[in-house]
Each structure stands twice: as C-alpha cells, then as structure tokens.
Image (spheres, rainbow, N blue to C red):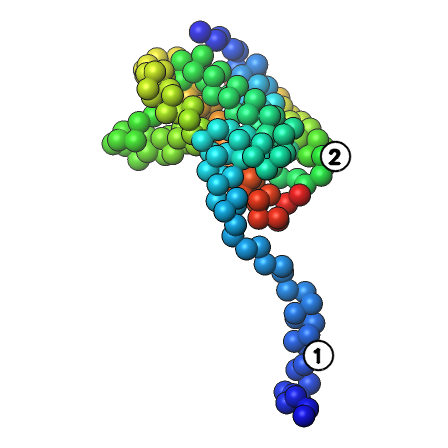
C-alpha cells in the first residue's frame, strides 16, 4: 500500500496533471513546457495558500 | 455576359470568405485515434507519430491510476445507484483498458475509510478525466487543428 502524506499526494497530483495540461492545451513544445510549469506552480501555490488559510482559521 | 451583382454587398462577402475558418473534414484517423487514446492512454498520440507526447501521457495517466490503486482507492461500478457513483464511474471509465483490467482483476474493490483511500479514489477519477482530455487532443491532431 502506498502511504503518501497530504502534501506529497498533492504534489504528485500536480505533477501529472500539469504534464497532461501542458501537452494538450498548447501547440509548440516550448509553449507546452512553459504552460506545464505554470500549471504546476499554480497547483503547488494553491496548496500552500490553502494550507496557510486553514492554519490561520484554526488559530 | 456579366455576372449579376447584388450592389455593394460583394466586397463584404469577399471579406467574409477570406476570414472564414478552414474546414476540417472528419477522417477515419480522427475517429480511430481518440478511441485508441481512450483505450490505451497516449495511444492516440503514438498512433499519430507524436511519440514523445504519447509516452508522457501514458506515463502520467498510468502512474496516477496505479498510485490511486496503491492508496486503496475505490473503483466505481456503472450500477452504483447513487448519482455521484455514476459520475465517479464516468471518471473511472476514462482510463479505458486500465479500468476494465482493474474490474477483471477485482482491484479497487475495497471500502477503506481513511484519508489515503479518499485521495486514491480522486487519483483514479482524475486519471480517467485527464485521459479523456488526451483523447480529445488526439482527435484535434488527427483533424489537423493542432500540429
């Protein structure tokens, strides 16, 4: 059984989803790489943002 | 003999023809590629000789599916009864052959109630949904809409 933490599961999810988004949503290779990295940054940034919001609510 | 004209509308209609979108006729490959892509993740791209993209899609979708199973994610059945179960089935079945293999091998037939299993279920559904997007992309490539 794979036992990933919440954060590592979110990063793995972001990685694979970004690869698919990059390939399918842009035309040239350079654009695909750039869009994939952009999606990954948004996913992981969203995780940190949501984490901080939840931490502040908990206080 | 001069062609009949319709006054000053001819210039406008010429411009309209010039900016009209090109037509993309439906070919056999435009039907086969997305079907293969659905059945084998990335298969549509590989069939269209986009080997790099196809392999990346294959690795991404298969990895998400296997991680989902490894986290004890649940595989939905078509006759779940609940509307949310049916939506889960639609997501899961997007993985194509992986879904049918999992059903045959009775993988994902667990009802574990923990956070990891919940993440696993999400991984399985999203793997299928991403594969649907990849299959649609293969369709666009086969039509010539995308290089």
* Relative to B97, A59 lies left or right: right
* Relative to B68, B44 lies left or right: right
Q: Chain of mark 2?
A: A
Looking at the rendering, which quadrant does residue B140 occupy? top right
Closer to the camera, A44 or A1? A1
Q: Which residue is mark 2?
A: A30
- Residue B133 showing in the rendered view: no
Closer to the camera, B97 or A30? B97
* Relative to B80, A8 lies left or right: right
Q: Quadrant of the N terminus of chain B?
A: bottom right
Residue at image location 48% in from the left, 8% down from the top: A3
In this view, B90 is above or below B69: below
* Residue A22: x %, y % from top left: 64, 33
Closer to the camera, B81 or B128? B128
Residue at image location 44% in from the left, 28% down from the top: B95
Whether residues under marks 1 and 2 lie with C-beta atoms below 8 angstroms apart, the answer is no
* Relative to B74, B3 lies left or right: right
- Residue B143 showing in the rendered view: yes
Question: Looking at the picture, do discs 1 and 2 lie on one chain?
Answer: no
Q: Which residue is mark 1?
A: B11
In this view, B25 is above or below A22: below
Looking at the rendering, which quadrant does residue A37 occupy? top right
Q: CA distance from mark 1 to mark 2?
A: 40 Å
Residue at image location 66% in from the left, 43% down from the top: B147
* Residue B58: x %, y % from top left: 55, 25
Q: Secondary structure under badge 1?
A: helix
Give neighbour class at mark 1: few <14, some 14-19, many 20+ (Cα, 10 Å): few
* Residue B117: x %, y % from top left: 41, 15
In this view, B48 is above or below B8: above
């Amino acid at each position: 059984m794979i036992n990933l933490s919440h954060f590592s599961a979110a990063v793995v999810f972001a990685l694979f989803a970004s690869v698919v988004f990059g390939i399918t949503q842009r035309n040239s290779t350079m654009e695909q790489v750039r869009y994939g990295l952009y999606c990954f940054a948004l996913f992981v940034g969203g995780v940190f943002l949501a984490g901080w919001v939840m931490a502040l609510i908990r206080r | 003999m001069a062609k009949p004209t319709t006054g000053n509308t001819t210039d406008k209609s010429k411009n309209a023809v010039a900016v009209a979108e090109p037509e993309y006729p439906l070919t056999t490959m435009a039907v086969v590629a997305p079907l293969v892509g659905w059945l084998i993740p990335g298969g549509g791209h590989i069939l269209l000789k986009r080997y790099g993209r196809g392999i990346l899609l294959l690795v991404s979708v298969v990895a998400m599916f296997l991680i989902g199973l490894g986290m004890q994610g649940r595989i939905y059945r078509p006759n779940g009864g609940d509307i949310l179960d049916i939506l889960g089935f639609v997501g899961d079945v997007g993985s194509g052959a992986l879904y049918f293999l999992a059903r045959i091998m009775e993988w994902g037939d667990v009802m574990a109630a923990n956070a990891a299993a919940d993440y696993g279920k999400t991984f399985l559904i999203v793997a299928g949904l991403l594969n649907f997007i990849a299959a649609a992309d293969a369709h666009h490539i086969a039509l010539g809409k995308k290089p």
